[in-house]
Image: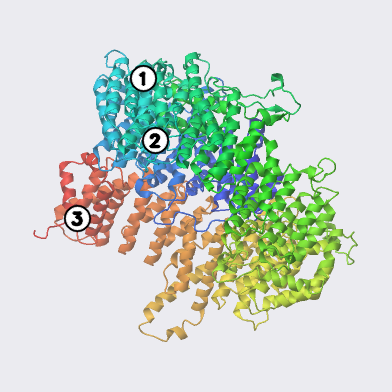
Amino acid sequence: MNKKSRSLLENPWHNAAFEGAGFVRLFLPTNAENQDFFSDNWIRECMELWDSIPNCQFWNSQWTAVMARVIKNYKFINWECFLPTLFTRFLNMFEVPVASGGGSYPFSVDVPRNTRFLFSNKTATPAKAIAKSIVYLLKPSSVAHEHFEKLVNLLEQYYHPSNGGRWTYSLERFLLYLVITFQKRLQHEQQNSNNDSQAELYLGKLERSAFVNVLLRLIDRGQYSKNEHLSETVAAATSILSYVEPSLVLPFLASRFHMALETMTATHQLKTAVMSVAFAGRSLFFTSLSSGSVKPVDLGGVDDTFIDLLMISLSNALLGMDANDPPKTLATMQLIGSIFSNMAMLDDNINELSIMPMIRFSEWLDEFFCRLFSLLLHLEPSSVLNEGLHSSATSGTFLVEDGPYYYCMLEILLGRLSKQLYSQALKKISKFVRTNILPGAIAEVGLLCCACVHSNPEEAVVHLVEPILSSVLSSLSGTPVTGFGGRGSLDTSVSTKAKPTLSPALETAIDYQLKILSVAISYGGPALLHYRDHFKEAIVSAFDSPSWKVNGAGDHLLRSLLGSMVLYYPMDQYKCTLNHPAAPALEEWISAKDYSDGALKAPKWHIPSDAEVQFANELLILHFQSALDDLLRICQTKLHSDPGNEKEHLKVTLLRIDSCLQGVLSCLPDFRPSSRNGTIEDSNYPSFLIAGATGSSVGSTELREKAAEVIHGACKYLLEEKSDDSILLILLIRIMDALGNYGSLEYDEWSNHRQAWKLESAAIIEPPVNFIVSSHSKGKRRPRWALIDKADMHSTWRSSQSSYHLFRASGNFSPPDHVILLMDDLLNLSLHNYESVRMLAGKALLKIMKRWPSLISKCVLSLSDNLRKANSPDHAVLGSCAVLSTQTVLKHLTMDPKAFASFLRAILLSSHHESLKAQKAINELFVKYNIHFAGVSKSIFRTGGSHIDAPDFADLVSQIGSMSFDSTGLHWRYNLMANRVLLLLAMACRNDPNISPKILRETAGHFLKNLKSQLPQTRILAISALNTLLKDSPYKMSADDQAMLSGNPQENAKSTLGEALQEIFQEEGFFSETLNSLSHVHIITDIDSASSRGNHGNSSFQSLADKSITRFYFDFSASWPRTPSWISLLGSDTFYSNFARIFKRLIQECGMPVLLALKSTLEEFANAKERSKQCVAAEAFAGVLHSDVNGLLEEWDSWMMVQLQHIILAQSVESIPEWATCIRYAVTGKGKHGTRVPLLRQQILNCLLTPLPPTVTTTVVAKRYAFISAALIELSPQKMPVPEIQLHNKLLDELLGNMCHSSAQVREAIGVTLSVSCSNIRLHVSSSQDDSNERGKTDTDNQLGEENWVQLLTERASEVVVNIQNSSLSDVLDTSTDINSKNGYQGGDSQDDVKWMETLFHFIISTLKSGRSSYLLDVIVQLLYPIISLQETPNKDLSTLAKAAFELLKWRIISECHLQKAVSVILSSANDSNWRTRSATLTYLRTFMFRHTFILSKGDKQKIWKTVEKLLQDSQVEVREHAAAVLAGLMKGGDEDLARDFRDRAYIEANSFQQRRKTRNRISGHSVASVHGVVLALAASVLSVPYDMPSWLPNHVTLLARFGGEPSPVKSTVTKAVAEFRRTHADTWNVQKDSFTEEQLEVLADTTSSSSYFA
């Protein structure tokens, strides 16, 4: 690790350490060139660093990622010695609840928000890095696999459906990444198997199957999880692994599927089982059919096991289609799609290619359609059918909405049928469609027809499209007509009073048939030309109909017909063209990365023929040109006298125009741009081009231009005559959008493409490694149809982009005039009264601006005017704000000075708008501008001749400055905005030498005055402004000055800024006013005190609009404190470090005059009664103490020291948190990493350590210790100078002498201070040991090295525990005899002992909480016994503390060097005379064994097992039962040898006991404890396998049940254990009961059946 990162990581209790770890993770190079750098020592060093901060998720995830990278890239490192530690960390990073404990760290170390934000740390558990490490650690003959198996043993129970919780997510990720990384590793090894020198480290067959076997355990547990993500991940994992080890995975899959079919009670199981088969369909086929090496015989099954499985699943799939169970229905459809994607063709002929000889597909097909039609008949539409303008043709039910499976399944099925079967299907579908009208399932029936037409257009058009078409025509003939459809038969003179209508039933039927037709013909192509006249007639009749619903359906049909004629789309997408070489009956799938095999056959695309283009042109003339003429006529000549008729005519005419544009997309040529320099040749066209077209060109540019002109006229007419008709305006905007934004319709289609994500479904992915037919590819393989789908979408995307960037790239072109016309109209419409109209117009306008950036400036100027004008209506303001707040506009402002100035003035001068809505919109616009503020254009500083009309920057600043004083009478929010803009501008011009000094001087002065502003928000903004602006510090002492400490202050060149500020603060009463107004920011209420840090006085009476603007400024994250805050004793403070920083910067900028001006006010406020005033005084004092300017030492001697002593001795309690933080700020190290010592640190520490006068109250004593601990947190222990070390020693003596203090509050403070000072000393010693080789040891180092305090603490603790236990025993004995014993006997030592012990517990708790325990672990291990044994004592306070320490201790991993000691303490307390201690030890043992299972030696484990076994015979029944529970847990925990040994012994002992009972006929001779112990050992064995049925279990359970006749407590143990066994095995009992004999089942039944009342 290089010097830089190492220095960051030196002090683990400083936030720089987190950044250091983040940088190491980001920048550590692990390529081949750097391999010499990585040695065993380097890794050891990393592991030590990793251990230095326990229980911190961020820290863990950074180091895990580093380790994972090194493990993956450097195979030569020998990891064996690190494995136990690594796996211990891996296990404990999964925060799972152990033995009824909590499921997350009780007190994790906090990481600052910005650090978390900078370095990725998405999930709590770095599952990906752990999985990566484990997979790459696996090598032939490595112990890593055993460790991995043990890890899975411990975690598998948490995958079970009944053990879900917040840990499920990280466990699911873990399983997923294990499988993915394993697949990647195998792929890499297969590709490099010939030429890699390290091939001996590759995974062979044995390692592969061992790994898969272990994973199957997790898959088995998680398969039926209630968590959807987990069950899906399990199915995907099964699919990938089935290609690696089919012989293990597929039989497992088959048995699970059959089991799910048998237990029909839980339907979610069936859904998951079906999904698993769908995902593994391909591997099932391969295993059965391939001529490869794996034969089904090797799989322990008959030849056709897996084909049978597929058949059963196919026939069951038909039962799964159920309108009332969407998830199961979709899973079923996915299964059918998956199976048929694999098969080359479906046919009834039985030949060598047939896959499933026992299934007759014609019968299956009949049954399938029968089920499908019944499903469609019973569907309920998911929403009320919308009658609005564009009820899409496909707003369907769950079949369409919830995923692409329905449509894909139909496409694949109909695409793969043989000719004969296709005809059979077509007849059935045709009959169904002709005889049913299902308005609730339009999309579903439409897609069914569409799939038919796509598969075979010629036949389908004849049998399916033609009947629907003729039925529509016959329904439409004879219905009343309006004459708006374009026949030219319009007669306006006849005024029809009674409006002709259709009956609702007829309307619904026509609408349904037209819409189905529109979906069905999407891929019809040339086959539709035979019926061109029918189509024309149908469309004209639909537009002629008086029903708006039918007009809308006609729109769909016209759109679809045009698209079908002119667009490019694949024709034979779902046919199979390639058979698999190893299994001819299957289709070969393709990997897009392997182009080498040349067998890729391009799809057949629909290229429009001349006849199709001609037909499309006819349709355009009929419905586009003639509709435009109609529109022009209506607008110019006012054809209709009746406004209702006029509206209908306009609606239909606009609908026809819109429909044509939506149908031909970008096949209608675009406008030609006009060139800046007059003429334009084709050769001047910019060369930047993305090839791509949607279809053949139809119509002409002139047609588009004509449309733009007519629409411009229509827009004018509508805004004058029909401005309140939103339907007409929305249609108009859609047309404008399609005309002006060439290619945007394709872009919308591409971005909404529903089927795009289905390509990632595991059902249609064959992984790159396939060991079944041993063919490995470079990437995933997918079916051909899926790749064609991708290609089709990609070509749509390219056609949308083809001319989009042409004119952005070059400045030679100005936008075509027609675009400018459209843009003006859209600009007007974006200010419309109705919100829906405004929104649509705004979106279309934005697209035009993106494509032609030169138009933005014009828009900004005209929209800014709307904000500034006094008489602008609300909707104009809302519309303007909506457009101005888009990123396109905000980005442009940084480059365009004129627009920039206009925008800022408009916002600041818009306070005259009264409505709340308008104000809220302006606020939001302003906040957005702040967030996206990216500086200003440089050209704004150079405003000379180039922009005559652009404003001068300095003028702009002074203009805004004048708005930002309170006196201007502006609303406070506008005052705030003006101040904010001023700050942004001042920041932006910092680097411009001509303007900067003057502006900075003015703005800094301005904000300094604002500190005493009457407006709270303005004050706070002034604080953040001054923090940003006050940077230079001429009076700050340099490091050399500090060394010399010269008496006379150096004469520095005063800064002009300093002079300007000096004038302001030397005014009379400036600081007193300022501090007073700042004190109002500290609103302190009881409720607030906990969370006031981010509150900054945002009181609740503000309106929403105000909150949005104030909250934005004041939630900036403080960069201080730079060390974790964990001392709860200090309470929550309202100390704002940025306030302190201002005073510090001000003093550094202007020197001593500030101090002199501030002194009297500060003293006055520090002695004030109100807490808010004390808060400000604390902030100002902290800034003064930390300023390090010349002359500060003299001031310290003259008044500051006295002031600090006064604060320490003050009686007031409530402001302690602020003063503690003040002291913490004052001693904080300088520099980013906090290593440079501030000038006054030593003086402040000495002042704190001065002994107090003997008469003070306990509050003051506690306060002093709180101050000391706050100060010590900020020191850098590894760089402590000698005086600080001596001070630590002196403090330690004082603390150890005061541990029996009479006040509980003081004892807590002493415990906390003790933990901080001891850990500081330890860290100093450990880092100075590293350096001591370079320099000689000093005396102080020797003193610290002796560590008398450890010995003193541990020895005294062991004496005190015994005393407390004895005294509590004697208490119990004496209470009856001597009531007065309390006063006489307990007044002395025993009370002191309890107090001393409480202080010790505070020390332990704060050490564990603070994350400093790594350096005091040996001390904590030696204090284990007191923590365990004092859980239950008569003294409640002591026990509460012991329990708190115990909870924290459970999460602490004890490192290997201290483990031996810990085990010996645990074993001795397990044999303690007090049974409560024995029981508490057992509680600790459960978590202890779980956390340390990898690092405990075998000998230690055996000792622990023996000890727990012995407790099974304990005299106390609670201890016996507890020991059994612990043993059951230990048996799950992976030490199989110990568990097996125990089980066998338990069985033999219980059996011999039973035999002896029979022969001796219940002669007593055994104590109850020994009988109970034997039974408990059996019960523990039974309960250690809650869900499985290993071969030994039936005998154990039966034997246990035979003890049911014993007296209590044995009987109740037996009953509970057997009942628990029954409960956990209930799900799978049908299958598992076969493991028992008849006799055994009878014995069990006797135990579980309750005895009858009548017996």
Name the residue rendered at 28%, 22% in the picture: 304
Q: Amino acid at mark 2?
A: Pro
Instruction: Specify few, some or many for label 1: CA neighbours under 10 Å numbering under 14, 14-19, or 20 or more.
Output: many
Horizontal and vertical percent for residue 469? Answer: 35, 24
Q: Classify residue 1588 by image quadrant.
A: top left
How far apart, in angstroms, are the residues tagged by discs 1 and 2?
29 Å
Label 1 sits on what residue type?
Val
In the picture of the structure, the residue carrying the numbered disc 2 is 546
Percent x, y for residue 988? 76, 49
SS state under label 1: helix
Residue at the spot 74% in from the left edge and 66% down from the top edge: 967
In-image side of 887 versus 445 (left or right)? right
- Asked if 501 appears above or below 1306 in the picture, the reply is above
Q: Which of the two marks, 3 or 2, is nearer to us in this view? A: 2
Task: Tell me: 523 left or right of 711.
Answer: left
Residue reaching furthest left? 1654
Q: Quadrant of the C terminus?
A: bottom left
- Residue 355 is labelled as none
Q: Name the one closer to the observer, 1406 or 1425.
A: 1406
Counting from the top left corner in percent of width and height, residue 1129 is at 58, 68
Question: Which residue position holds label 3?
Answer: 1604
Mark 3 element type: helix
Residue 461 badge = 1
Image quadrant of residue 1089?
bottom right
First reached walking from the N terminus: tag 1 or tag 2: 1
Looking at marks 3 and 1 on the same chain, the residue that comes earlier in the sequence is marked by 1
CA separation in Å, label 3 and label 2? 85 Å
